[in-house]
């Protein structure tokens, strides 16, 4: 299935214009498809024999799906970038479309794509284009590898497909290099981030004046960490509207039953995320002891069971590394992560005096699963967090 438009992710086959066994010319229309915008034709990329049609009428297929095969000459196959075989099976696509071969549509219709809302730029359920043979998957399983481990490996097979030979040569090169075993925690973090990145992640940000927060912190007998201020502000904001922390499960958004918010702690060889339960119910002065205790236990790798897992959001203070801006990735089971950058002294406009005065300012960011939140909702949530951070007495 070719990319039929900038925002088109799937199309429905409504009419077949050729049959198996027909001889076709370059540019000849093979089938008629319908998108949510128009009816279009899929054309042959080269002359050849229609060897096989894999589609069913009135079913939807994502961009990149195999619609059928053409038997072409070696010259035409080479021209299309399909090298290495005398007679090539050429996936049907339009010149200029994505060249990677896709997974065939399953016989039981499991890969069928049906938009849950008309006119969505990308319909829910689109599997995307990608292909790995059973033999390749077996080899990868043997080495404990995932598709992301081979992201930078150029393939020599048809349409750039990674072959078994490519894979074995890649593994041989790996064995010749200096390696160290990854820790259990590093492997777990890598797996979590790989699963997180299967979702569309976006980030919004805004600067916040930290002078009120810093003044409030100086007055506290036991001083809260900056991330605790952000955690408490996020907990209050989510209490007012739990939808931004909801999870998309199928065609339903599941609202959280409790405002349990985690915070990232850098430890040896990775990151742990202790969770403060019901962070919306206790003022910040009552959370400092538990927060400091969880940081200490995290560094000892001894987090208690009641402080691990089940969080609905995470706060990360990347400002501790001197960073002013970053785009953290939410955990796989969470929709949002709030980030806090390092505070810097910058000129700020003072309405009372009518002049610029020095203020401490930091960027806060909100990275979110774009399937659940749009930019407006994310922006409103972040603005509410910023408002609470500039009124720390409310925390």
Image: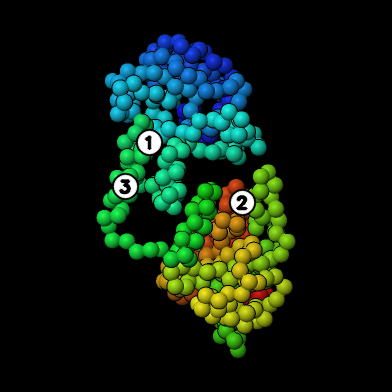
- 3 vs 2, front mark: 3
| Residue at 49% in and 68% down | 271
Q: Depth-wise, is mark 2 or mark 1 nearer the camera?
A: 1
Residue at the image position 61 percent from the left and 69 percent from the top: 308
The residue drawn where x is 48% and y is 66% is: 185
Graded by Cα atoms within 10 Å as few (under 14), some (14 to 19) or many (20 or more), the crowding at tag 3 reads: some
Q: CA distance from mark 3 to mark 1?
A: 14 Å
Decide which of 236, 389 is in the foreground and name it. Answer: 236
Residue 106 location in percent, x, y? Answer: 56, 31
> Can residue 226 be seen at all in this image of the molecule?
no
Whether residue 255 can be seen here: yes
- Residue 313 falls left or right of residue 136: right
Question: In the rendered image, which residue does mark 2 sit on?
Answer: 373
Secondary element at image label 1: loop
Residue, disc 1: 161
Of residue 149 and residue 273, the one placed in the foreground of this image is: 149
Out of 294 and 6, give the one closest to the viewer.
294
């Amino acid at each position: 299935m070719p990319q039929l438009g900038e925002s088109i992710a799937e199309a429905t086959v409504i009419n077949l214009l050729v049959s198996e066994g027909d001889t076709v010319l370059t540019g000849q229309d093979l089938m008629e498809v319908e998108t949510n915008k128009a009816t279009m034709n899929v054309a042959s990329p080269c002359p050849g024999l229609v060897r096989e049609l894999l589609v069913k009428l009135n079913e939807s297929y994502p961009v990149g799906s195999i619609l059928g095969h053409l038997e072409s000459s070696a010259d035409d196959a080479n021209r299309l970038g399909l090298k290495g075989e005398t007679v090539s099976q050429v996936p049907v696509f339009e010149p200029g479309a994505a060249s990677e071969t896709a997974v065939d549509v399953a016989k039981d219709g499991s890969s069928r794509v049906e938009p849950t809302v008309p006119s969505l730029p990308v319909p829910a359920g689109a599997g995307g284009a990608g292909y790995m043979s059973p033999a390749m998957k077996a080899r990868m399983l043997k080495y404990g590898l995932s598709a992301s481990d081979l992201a930078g490996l150029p393939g020599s097979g048809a349409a750039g497909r990674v072959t078994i030979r490519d894979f074995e040569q890649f593994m041989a090169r790996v064995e010749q290099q200096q390696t160290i075993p990854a820790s259990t925690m590093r492997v777990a973090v890598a797996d979590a981030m790989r699963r997180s990145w299967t979702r569309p992640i976006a980030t919004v940000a805004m600067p916040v004046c930290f002078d009120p927060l810093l003044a409030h912190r100086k007055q506290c007998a036991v001083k809260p960490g900056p991330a605790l201020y952000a955690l408490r502000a996020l907990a209050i904001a989510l209490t007012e509207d739990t939808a931004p922390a909801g999870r998309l499960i199928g065609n339903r958004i599941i609202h959280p039953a409790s405002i349990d918010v985690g915070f990232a702690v850098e430890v040896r060889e990775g990151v742990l995320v202790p969770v403060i339960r019901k962070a919306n119910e206790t003022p910040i002065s009552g959370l400092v002891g538990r927060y400091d205790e969880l940081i200490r236990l995290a560094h000892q790798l001894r987090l208690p069971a009641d402080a691990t897992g089940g969080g609905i959001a995470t706060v990360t203070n990347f400002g501790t590394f001197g960073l002013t801006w970053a785009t953290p990735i939410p955990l796989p089971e969470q929709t949002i992560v709030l980030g806090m950058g390092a505070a810097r002294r910058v000129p700020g406009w003072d309405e009372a005096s009518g002049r610029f005065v020095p203020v401490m300012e930091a960027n806060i960011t909100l990275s979110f699963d774009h399937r659940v939140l749009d930019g407006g909702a994310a922006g409103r949530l972040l603005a509410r967090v910023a408002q609470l951070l500039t009124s720390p007495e409310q925390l």
